[in-house]
Image (spheres, rainbow, N blue to C red):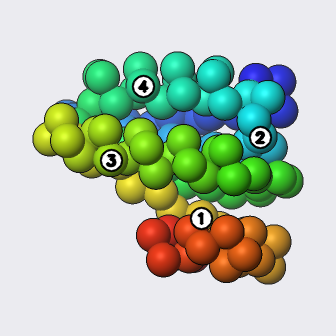
Amino acid sequence: MENVSFENTLIGDTGIQVLVSGSLEIRDAAGIKNELLLLIANHDHVELQFKNIEKIDLTALQLLMALSQSASDSGKKVSCVFEPTAYISEVLNNSGFNKFISV
């Protein structure tokens, strides 16, 4: 996970805000999954703020959706907030994820 960074800030007693930056690609999927599963296990609400995203692929988007659904099934919440850039809008529109994730 050398191309992605996580910066955590607590929100109240049960939540955490995580600034995610860099590249989110298939080669980093296992590390990203493990990091996010740990956050979800320890917090009721995880807010992921994506900024300065250099690259994101379909695998990363699918992983985010799966983790969000899994958290919801456990009574927890994962929110994804993307910095509105032309690149992110294009990726979300081309992949169809703009129906689930807004910028």
Compared across the picture, whether 92 is left or right of 78 comes to right
x and y percent of residue 45 in the render?
A: 28, 43
Which residue matches tag 1? Answer: 82
Give the Cα distance between marks 3 and 2.
Answer: 20 Å
Compared across the picture, whether 60 is left or right of 54 comes to left
x and y percent of residue 55 in the render?
A: 83, 52
x and y percent of residue 35 in the render?
A: 53, 23
Q: Are marks 3 and 2 in contact (CB under 8 Å)?
A: no
Q: Earlier in the sequence, mark 4 or mark 3?
A: 4
Compared across the picture, whether 8 is left or right of 93 comes to left
Which residue matches tag 4? Answer: 37
Which residue matches tag 2? Answer: 25
Give the Cα distance between marks 1 and 3.
Answer: 18 Å
Which residue matches tag 3? Answer: 69
Residue at figure coordinates x 77%, y 40% from the top left: 25
Helix, strand or loop status at disc 4? helix
Give the Cα distance between marks 4 and 2.
Answer: 17 Å
Residue at figure coordinates x 79%, y 29% from the top left: 27
Q: Earlier in the sequence, mark 2 or mark 1?
A: 2
Q: Residues within 10 Å of mark 4 (few under 14, many from 20)?
A: some
Give the Cα distance between marks 4 and 3.
Answer: 12 Å
Q: Quadrant of the N terminus?
A: top right
